[in-house]
Amino acid sequence: MKSPSPPLLVLVGPTASGKSEVAMGVAQRLRVEIVSGDSMQVYRGMDVGTAKPSPLERAAVPHHLLDLVDPREPFSVAAFKEEADRSIVEVHQRGNLPFLVGGSGLYIRAVVENYDLSPDETDASIRDKWRLAAQREGMAALHRKLGEVDPAAAARIHPNDLRRLVRALEVWERTGHPISEAVGRTGARGRLYDVLQMGLAWPREELYRRIDRRVDRMIAAGLVGEVERLAARGFGQVAGQALGYKEFLPSLRGEISLEEAAARLKQDTRRFAKRQLTWFRAQPEVHWIETGAAGWPEGVVEETVRLVAEKWPGMYNRG
C-alpha cells in the first residue's frame, strides 16, 4: 500500500564512512537526487575540507544544499530544515526519490522528525553566568556538566565550542529540559515523510584508518591552501569552528607546524566520529549495514537498493 506521506531515503554514518560513495552507487540503480545532510557543505569555498562532491559527481547526479552561503554568514538548523524541505518537495515533483545523505545528526533529525524550530527565548543573565564559569573553571568543566544533564547534546557538541556549550546549558537551566529535546519537538505537527533510514557501520580501527587516509588525501588535494584563502577573507563564528579548518589556523599563524596541525585534525576527526556514532546509535529507526559483512561498497549499495524495493516497490528503479 502506498504511504500517504512522501518517501525520504536517509543515509547516515560517521565521517569517512563512505556515505558519498554509497550514495553515488545507489544513484546508478535508482532515480534519486542527493540532499546533503552536512552542516558545513552549505558554505561556498569550503570544498576540500568538507569532502564536498566534485563537479563531475554533481553533473552525474543532482545534489542539493551545497554552496548556499558565504563562510562569513551564519547558517542555522532552522535555515537548513527550510532549505531541505523545499528541495525534497522539488525532488518529489520530478518523480524522483530524495536521498538525504550526511553526518550532521541534529540537522538530519530536524528533517526526519519535522522539528518545530521557531525562535526560542534567551536569558542573558544565565548565559553570562555560564560564560563566567567557563573563564573561571575552563570549558572542560562546562562540557562535563552538560554531559550530566544532557548526554545527547554533549555527544555532539565539541568540548571547545563555547557558544554551543553555553547555549545548551542556558536552555537546560531556563526550561528544565535538555536542548536535545527543546531545540525542536515534533509535537502535534507529525512527520512530513515516510522515512527509510540507514547507517554505515565500520569496525572502529578500520574507521580510524579510513579517517587518517582521508586527512592525508585532503592535504594532498590542497586543504591548507583552501584554509589560507578563506582565512584571508575571514570566517564567521560557525564556519570558523569547522573540522578541517580550525586545526590549521594556528599553523597559518606560525604557532604550530603543519605536521602538528595534520595530527590534530586526525585526532579531532576520530573524536568527532565517536560522537557521531553515539548520536546515531541512539536513533532506534536506523537500519545499520555492517560494511564488512555486506561487502564494500557493492554489497552495501545492493542492500540499500533491496531495502528501497521492499519499502516502495517498483517506484524508483532506473530504466
Image (tube, rainbow, N blue to C red):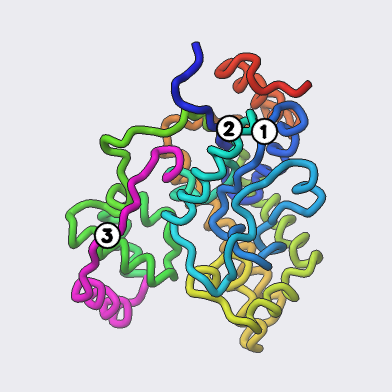
Residue 243: which numbered mark, if any? Answer: none
Q: Is residue 117 magenta?
A: yes
- Is residue 276 visible to the viewer in this orientation of the structure? yes
- Point 67% across, 46% down: residue: 63
Please give the range of residues in magenta. 110-139
The residue pinned by badge 3 equals: 120
- Assign a secondary structure to mark 1: strand
Marks 3/2: CA–CA distance: 31 Å
Would you say the magenta stretch is mainly helix, strand or loop? Answer: helix
Return the disc, 1 or 3, that comes first in the chain's sequence: 1
- Judge whether residue 200 can be spotted in this image: no
Crowding at mark 2 (Cα within 10 Å: few <14, some 14-19, many 20+): some
Q: Look at label 2 and name its amino acid.
A: His
Given the image, on which type of amino acid does mark 3 rest? Asp
- Between disc 3 and disc 2, the foreground one is 2
Q: Nearer the viewer, residue 103 or 187?
A: 187
For the residue marked with disc 1, what is the amino acid? Answer: Val
